[in-house]
Image (cartoon, coloured by chain):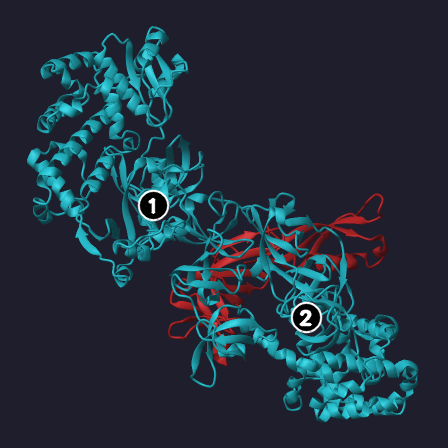
Chain colours: A cyan, B red
Amino acid sequence: MPRRSREEEEEEAVDDMEEEEEEEEERGGKRSRAGGHGKRSRGVESFIDDADEDDDDDDDDDDDDYGGGGRGRASKRRRSSILIDDMAQVDDDDDIDDDSSDVEPGFIDDTDAGVEIRHNDVVRRCIPHSSSMLEDNEDMQEIVRRLQNRYKEASHFDYDEEVTEVEQQALLPSVKDPKLWMVKCATGHERETAVCLMQKFIDRPNLQIKSVVALEHLKNFIYIEAEKEAHVKEACKGLRNIIASTKPTLVPIREMADVLSIESKSVDLSRDSWVRMKLGMYKGDLAKVVDVDNVGRKVTVKLIPRIDLQVLANKLDGQEVPKKSFIPPPRFFSVDEARELHIRVDRRRNRDSGEYFDVVGGLLFKDGFLHKTFSIKSISTQNIKPTFDELEKFKKPGDDLNEDVASLSTLFTNRKKGHFMKGDAVIVIKGDLKNLKGSVEKVEDSTVHIQPKLAGLPRTLAFSETDLCKYFNPGDHVKVISGVQEGATGMVVKVEGHVLIILSDTTKEHIRVFADHVVESSEVTTGVTRIGDYELHELALLNNSSFGIIIRLESEAFQVLKGVPDKPELVLVKLREIKCKIDRRTSAKDRYNNIVSTKDVVRVAEGACKGKQGPVEHIHRGILFIYDRHYLEHSGFICAKAQSCFLVGGSTGSHHGNAMDKADPHFHAFGSQARILQSPGRLPPRGPQMNSGGRFGGRGSGGRGNDTLVNRCIKIRSGPYKGYRGRVKELTGLLVRVELESLMKIVTVKREDIGETAAVATPFRETCYSRGVETPVHPSRTPLHPIQTPMRDPGATPVRDVMRTMPSRAWVPLSPHRDNREDGDSTWASSPAYQPGTPRPRPYEAPTPGSGWASWGDASVNTPSTNVPSTPIGQPMTPDPASYLVGTPSGQPMTPGYGGMELMSPVIGGEAEGSWLLPDVLVNVSRGGDEVSNAVVKEVLLDGSCRVSLGPLGEGDELIVTANELEVIRPKKNEKLKIMNGSLRGATGKLIGVDGSDGIVKVEGSLDVKIVDMAILGKLAA
Amino acid sequence: MFFHIVLERNMQLHPRHFGPHLRDKLVSKLIKDVEGTCSGRHGFVVAITGVEDIGKGLIREGTGYVTFPVKYQCVVFRPFKGEILEAVVTMVNKMGFFAEAGPVQIFVSNHLIPDDMEFQSGDVPNYTTSDGSVKIQKESEVRLKIIGTRVDATEIFCIGTIKDDFLGVINDPGAAV
């Protein structure tokens, strides 16, 4: 090896010299001539060819490169460096010159190029390592003879005869033989050092070392063979690459053979095998070997290019290309796309293989793949486990994965020991007996004896392990033993050659695995069932006080189905994100107030999972996790509120009856309690209207569902009021009126936007409607009011005034929305309740003569706009704060809430598309038909509309537009943008590329490059 | 496949049932306990057809329960690989469809549905041939071949195929409407 590199150096030197000369002489002149020659592919060209050609040829050759490459000296340099492989990194010419000043007496300087070449020829033919002796002017023949003599003894074995083990044994080094010393030298200079030592040996024959070895794989050390340590030291003296301070280490005799024995795992690269890149932009990428140049230690691989065409275009245009800090994602090269960017794409034919390549700026592309030549060192060949996704990408359409026997062979080299076991069904994939099926009889090292299934064949046949692949039949139950899906079990659904499609037992999903990665098994698992303390299907408390059931374990992460009823919410959490596991035995009440505990079978009565049924696996905070084996998603787990489920088993009917019996007294109790304890506030304002009707009218089951939620403390989970806590005032259809604790106002939010702070049932939807239906009953109840009124009389008046005033003040901004209240609100279930309700306050007129109450009531019905001016009628100052506080929650007068409802609905509606608008985003405003103008969002208002200022820079008029009049302008490449949704919401950045519907965004303030859906990107106003 | 076999089971009976109707009690308890269960070995116990023999009871210490060895004849249903069954489709999704043949759940993967049938999502997800003549949706009756079984202690799960001659829809409720 050192010798080879020596030679290379020489050649390099020679080449360089020639070039320089030629360059001077013939610059320009020959360029046109060279144009006529096809460009020689640099990768294929071997340096030996080069040198073997005579002077003229050499000239030509060089010229070719000049002309074709058009890069003159620089390109030549590169070629040279390719020729000497990795040595170039360490040995630049200067280096050699330095060294040669003492050890090599300047042969480079005084050599005539032509002579040198001739010498080279001779030298190569006979003894390719002794060229450096030329300077001694010894007779060639003499050298040859001498060397032949030297090696005669060593090569006396007849290799044709089989070498017996004993003979081999005899060759092992013994105590009498020279010893091997390990000497430390500068990293990367191992070969150089060896060459230097050789030179030294030639110069000074009294040097008593026998040989020097620099091993490819061993960095920082060389081996010197010598009798004594002193000899080694002597030899090393004066060599600057050898670290003099370290003592040579003796290699024990036993290990001497190992030093020079070839690694059994030596790189066995063949075409079509899979490799991974070790360095550079493609680090970690899978590549397929196209061509191997064992002499040049180079491989040509095809990989999926990571090329930013835009950048490439800029570069070819001669524009300054900024150093990028990110690596473009792998994408297939498309000639059309390149042409679109005005990149010149040449189509050339490779001289050797006859294949056509698209050439762009020196890069070769074929079928979208990049064909590139790398040094063997820069690729890793061991332990390549291509994943399915990667392989699929490499698969041409219509190309069968299995046809690629060679590519599979890569997979086979990674087989674990004991891959085949007796009884395994196997199929032959190589050779004459391809596709022969059989079962394994015996395994001996790498030979597998199989019993063929076909009749008429010998009892057993022996195959090499690599010729065989496991074989499975559809319906077999298997377990995956390696790969990404390791541990999963399932049934084979389909066999596509060496790829199995398995139906996983637990997830009921299809998994694609290599036949080689599975074994037949009757075990049923999902793979790993435990990470740390947490096991599959356990209930875990997550960091952010949410909880969920672990439904799948992935490598180092759990997939958790969160305890959010109605819509399944999946999160992937890391081990550290789980606080603890919840292992409490709790129970909850179902909708009929039956106690549900774990393992009880329940059926979901409402919500998205309505009709699902199964045993309860966990209960936490009134949320049930139900396992329905017929449910396929989320491993069959369903999350539902206890209150929206009912216990199955026993007769539901009787339960129902019981429940009613139980519920009714409970209900009444609740009602009465409610008046006193739970919702004292409910009484003063609303008592006369609703309570009397509701309670004594026995709204019965209809209203019960509502009552469970009404007056509960809830937290708003999403929407504009996200995060607020409040008390539920009323339920109407899908909407809930909530009195916010912090804002002293009542807002209407969607039912699904609220989350309970306590276990609360979602009332049955129907009941809400039925309630609307039932409300007309109220008027008939009104006569009862007078009975009640006395109760209220004492303190009622002031309270009521307060109640009227305060909320109405809060509603002032909302008042415009009330205009359409009367015509557009038939959907609002309780409106009929309200209307009949309004006359009711009249009876109070008497007790509160001065309040202007009656007029308010009337006004609110007929001309709501007058409501605002009417507010001052109520005495704002009268409030008895205590009573107000107590009273706040519940019985808000109907009207305002009503108005509030009207108001809120657009907010909620707008929320879906509008709320993710952000200030500074450039939008198109379309007002009044087809007039569209640019505008900049200044502010997003609570109700979803936006304050925008017109003009692309936002310098124009400001106006307020609703979300549906806005259209976000998507950023183009290299434009600044704002991410309007997702985890990066609010972040600004720059679009550096577009990939289908995804944008590649460089997030400002970090080096991150994110791939974000274009739909959530908004162009940032300049 | 159905089998009529004799099985044995140790029944525990509470002392309060001891009396003239002991045998009846025992049999009714046996029926309650056994019918509808599934054992990996024998499959689903569909019905008990008769009690062959009730052995001598053994009083268990401490509890007073008495254990009777009971031999009974029953009809069991066990699906086998390669068996052809008729089943009712219970669920259709993009991965395939589930069908039930009595107590046995069978999954037919989309790989095992003829290639000309394609999944159509929508209100009623179904697999339909390109010409629309054959449709597999919920409640359809199909004839399928079992290609694999997984037997748990309490459940038998099968994988079936309809990608073979004479397999497929035999009665389509959708077509009738």
Which sits earlier in the primary sequence, circle 2 or circle 1? Answer: 1
Instruction: Estimate the x, y position of residue A886 in percent, counting from the top left.
Output: 84, 72
Q: Is A67 placed above or below A957 here?
A: above
Q: How dense is the environment of label 2, judged by Cα within 10 Å: few (below 14), some, or many (20 and up)? A: some
Q: How dense is the environment of label 1, judged by Cα within 10 Å: few (below 14), some, or many (20 and up)? A: many
Of residues A148 and A915, the one nearer the viewer is: A915
Placement of the C terminus of chain A among the 4 image quadrants: bottom left
Instruction: Estimate the x, y position of residue A907 in percent, counting from the top left.
Output: 61, 76
**A432 sits to left or right of B124:** left
**A648 sits to left or right of A1007:** right
Q: What is the number of the mark on residue A287?
A: 1
**Chain to which mark 1 belongs:** A
Which residue bears the numbered disc 2?
A605
Instruction: Estimate the x, y position of residue A259 in percent, counting from the top left.
Output: 36, 20
Q: Is A92 placed above or below A792 here?
A: above
Of residues B52 and A198, the one nearer the viewer is: A198
* Residue occupying the point 78% across, 59% down: B24
Q: Is residue A695 visible?
A: no
Instruction: Estimate the x, y position of residue A793 in percent, counting from the top left.
Output: 91, 84
